[in-house]
Image (cartoon, rainbow, N blue to C red):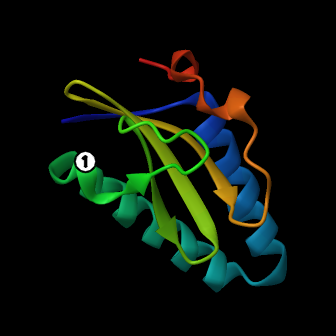
Amino acid sequence: MTLVWSSLAVERLHEIAQYIFQDNEETAVQWLDAVLEQVAQLIDFPQIGRVVPETNREDIRELLYKNYRIIYWLDGEVVNLLTIRHGKQILPLEDLKPHQTDR
């Protein structure tokens, strides 16, 4: 499998890491490393995440890490990371548009 990050997913990753960094640098680095480890698992195990409840589509899935949802779209042999959201945030359906990935 190939892993592709959307510009939105990269932006969210940086925003969240910066927010945590303001509070605690070490925690931010640990969080970032852990998220990247979670995402790396998708290369070998793309079905590991659950179906995103808002869509009920088998090809749009999410990994849950602590309070965050790592949302991705399966497109054949490509795992497209779409966004990362806090679990308490409403998930805008625009965030799930597959065309937002950068190949």
The residue sitting at 49% across, 20% down in the picture is 102
* Quadrant the N terminus occupies: top left
**Among the 4 quarters of the image, the one containing residue 82:** top right
Q: Is residue 87 left or right of residue 55?
A: right
Q: Residue at x 59, y 23 (%)?
A: 97
Q: Quadrant of residue 60?
A: top left
Expressed as whole percent of the image width and height from the top left, the position of residue 27 reads 63, 83
Residue at x 51% of width, y 49% of height: 52
**Mark 1, other Cα within 10 Å: few <14 / some 14–19 / many ≥20:** many
At horizontal 49% and vertical 67% (from top left) the residue drawn is 64
Residue linked to disc 1? 46
Q: Is residue 66 above or below residue 71?
A: below
- Identify which residue, 47 or 80, lies in the foreground: 47
Instruction: Look at the picture and state if 55 lies above or below 71.
Output: above
Q: Quadrant of residue 95?
A: top right
Query: Would you say 76 lies left or right of 3 here?
Result: left
Labels in figure, total: 1
94 relative to 14, above or below: above
If the image is split into quadrants, where does the C terminus sit?
A: top left
Residue nearest the viewer, comparing 47 with 14:
47
31 relative position to 38: left or right: right
Q: Amino acid at mark 1?
A: Pro
Residue 46 on image: x %, y %: 25, 47
On the image, the x and y values in percent for residue 51 come to 43, 50
